[in-house]
Amino acid sequence: MAPFIQPFLIFLVIFNPFITNSFTEEIEVLVFLPQNDSFLFSHARVAPAIRYAQDRLKAEYPGFHFNIHFENSDLANHALFTLADRSCNLKPDLILGPVREYEAAGVVRLASHWKIPVISAGALATAFKNKETEYSHLTRIAPSYVKMAETFKAMFEHFTWKSALLLIEDDMKERDCYFTLEGVYHLMDDYNVEVEIIHEQAPFNIEETFKNNQDMEVVIICAGADRIREIMLAAHKQQLTNGSYMFFNVDLFNASSYGNGSWKREDEFDDDARQAYASLNTVTLLRTVKPEYENFSMEMKRSIEGLGLYDCNDCGNVNMFVEGFHDALVLYSIALHEGMKNGYSKTNGTEITSHMWNRTFEGIAGQVSIDVNGDRVGDFSLMAMTNIEAGNYEVVVNYFGENKTFQLLPAFNSDHFTLTRRKEVPKKEKEVENHSCGLGVSALTGVTVGAVLGALMLIAFYFFRKNYRITIQRRTRVEEPESMKHHQLREDSIRSNFSAA
Ligand SMILES: *[C@@H]1O[C@H](CO)[C@@H](O)[C@H](O)[C@H]1NC(C)=O
Ligand SMILES: *[C@@H]1O[C@H](CO)[C@@H](O)[C@H](O)[C@H]1NC(C)=O
Ligand SMILES: *[C@@H]1O[C@H](CO)[C@@H](O)[C@H](O)[C@H]1NC(C)=O
Ligand SMILES: *[C@@H]1O[C@H](CO)[C@@H](O)[C@H](O)[C@H]1NC(C)=O
Ligand SMILES: *[C@@H]1O[C@H](CO)[C@@H](O)[C@H](O)[C@H]1NC(C)=O
Ligand SMILES: *[C@@H]1O[C@H](CO)[C@@H](O)[C@H](O)[C@H]1NC(C)=O
Ligand SMILES: *[C@@H]1O[C@H](CO)[C@@H](O)[C@H](O)[C@H]1NC(C)=O
Ligand SMILES: *[C@@H]1O[C@H](CO)[C@@H](O)[C@H](O)[C@H]1NC(C)=O
């Protein structure tokens, strides 16, 4: 008997996919990353992570062969045109990237139309939440800006704050800060939220802004490191850093730009800045590390160093994008394998995409949860200055997106998060109530930004022009009726985007 059984067993092992992971499949992967190393998600930084994932997946899914093609996405629309051109011969089975919002909008739209799964560690803007139609095949493997905003919402509930002033530095190109705080604006429509846009080059009257927004409790800033320092110094000079406002800034990705010494410039203002930053708290991504991560991180550093990139002293820091694109390939493999087990193939992008959503898996740095809408659930940390003499920061609070709860760490000090003027001025509830306009504005914001991105891509398709300089009319509080307030972000984005095209 034995001689007959053995070949039969081998036959089973090789050809019965239900017993092993040995489905075989050639998978065409198209990756869009910029060559320019000033981006944290440049080709040089991210490609080694994708290769690393590819190598490791060979053990688990020996039958999956990834043919990975890297394309650059430096120029606006290059990614979109490349996708269109390449797909004349052979459509890719999977697209990774692009990260930047405007490139991602075009690529994801076309890919969704062709039902090709796209996984990006970017495309974090609020509009990409809309998976009903135009972004139907997009899976976001890094927590979006709206997920980040949950941290603020939870804090506002916990500390019973009612109002916020968003200070957004808008570069009119990548618009990262604009999209970052758009998430907060979108999520917090139950609160009294004001927005001030700061232009990178133009002078900005900080004193005036604070004077006009005296009744705001919380100031949330997204800007370059120098601009933040400028704002904090001005606030300190006006004695607003004594607990009469809560200050926050958001810096999700660049670990070297926050924390200990972020106030320091070796100039005569260092001392003031240190004191001012005592009331500035930073929201950032919660980083987790597990043993396997060590090897990954070392390998990433090694490949970056091997390239000898100039002007790249923080390149050794493995960031969220690098991790994200690694995990993207893992997630796709899990989904494809599961889809094939259910009798589908890689050509059914809709089916494969559905297996990526509503699932938790082990990423390179820890557990990754993708929600039912195909967006990664986010965990965030809040850093605060805990030693004012030394100007040192520590993580004081963690926020877990999965169960939407806070974890207060030993360094947390509730006095630090108590508004002093609460004790002096009785709260005027009236102001908080009369802003709600019940129009479902947050949904509209998303839809409109989506439509605007669409219009932009369409128009830009014909009239490509990258360099533009435009001025948004500065809203003045006096002129604008209260009812206009909620439309401000939308109007700004329409104006600026249309000017862009
Ligand atoms: C890379 O990007 C930065 C910032 O956007 C820009 O200043 C620089 O000129 C770019 N470098 C190249 C080689 O395109
Ligand atoms: C903080 O400074 C502001 C502005 O000078 C002042 O109105 C307020 O009373 C001060 N609050 C405390 C607690 O010192
Ligand atoms: C990260 O932050 C540091 C310090 O602010 C800055 O010098 C560097 O250019 C930033 N890197 C990127 C890619 O934004
Ligand atoms: C990482 O692990 C691989 C295989 O286990 C090994 O070949 C490699 O040397 C390790 N890299 C580092 C930097 O430890
Ligand atoms: C893809 O899978 C879905 C089920 O998720 C099915 O309804 C659809 O018909 C399939 N499409 C093709 C082209 O096989
Ligand atoms: C998501 O997954 C959970 C369990 O894993 C399941 O109970 C739930 O029905 C799923 N939701 C959707 C919308 O598929
Ligand atoms: C800042 O420095 C202190 C003391 O040296 C250290 O305990 C803390 O971990 C540092 N914080 C960060 C975010 O690096
Ligand atoms: C929420 O999730 C985090 C991380 O998974 C866990 O550490 C924490 O205990 C959870 N909190 C609650 C209240 O379940």
Image (cartoon, grey):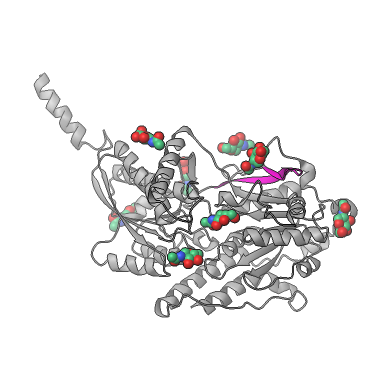
In the figure, is residue 140 to the left or right of 115? right
In the figure, is residue 130 to the left or right of 178? left
Q: Which residues are magenta?
A: 378-393
In the figure, is residue 342 to the left or right of 120? left
Q: Is residue 25 above or below residue 93?
A: above
Image position, residue 71 (x, y; %): 34, 61
The N terminus lies in quadrant: top left
Q: Residue at x 60, y 62 (%)?
A: 182
Q: Residue at x 28, y 37 (%)?
A: 21
Q: Residue furthest top?
A: 1
**Count of all numbered marks drawn on residues in the image:** 0
Q: Residue at x 42, y 65 (%)?
A: 74
Magenta stretch containing residue 388, yes or no?
A: yes
Q: Nearer the viewer, residue 3 or 416?
A: 416
Image position, residue 403 (x, y; %): 59, 42
- Please identify the quarter of the rendering in which residue 212 is found: bottom right
Q: Residue furthest right?
A: 424
Q: Is residue 105 above or below residue 390?
A: below
In the figure, is residue 408 to the left or right of 469? right
Image position, residue 303 (x, y; %): 39, 46
Q: Nearer the viewer, residue 471 or 187?
A: 471
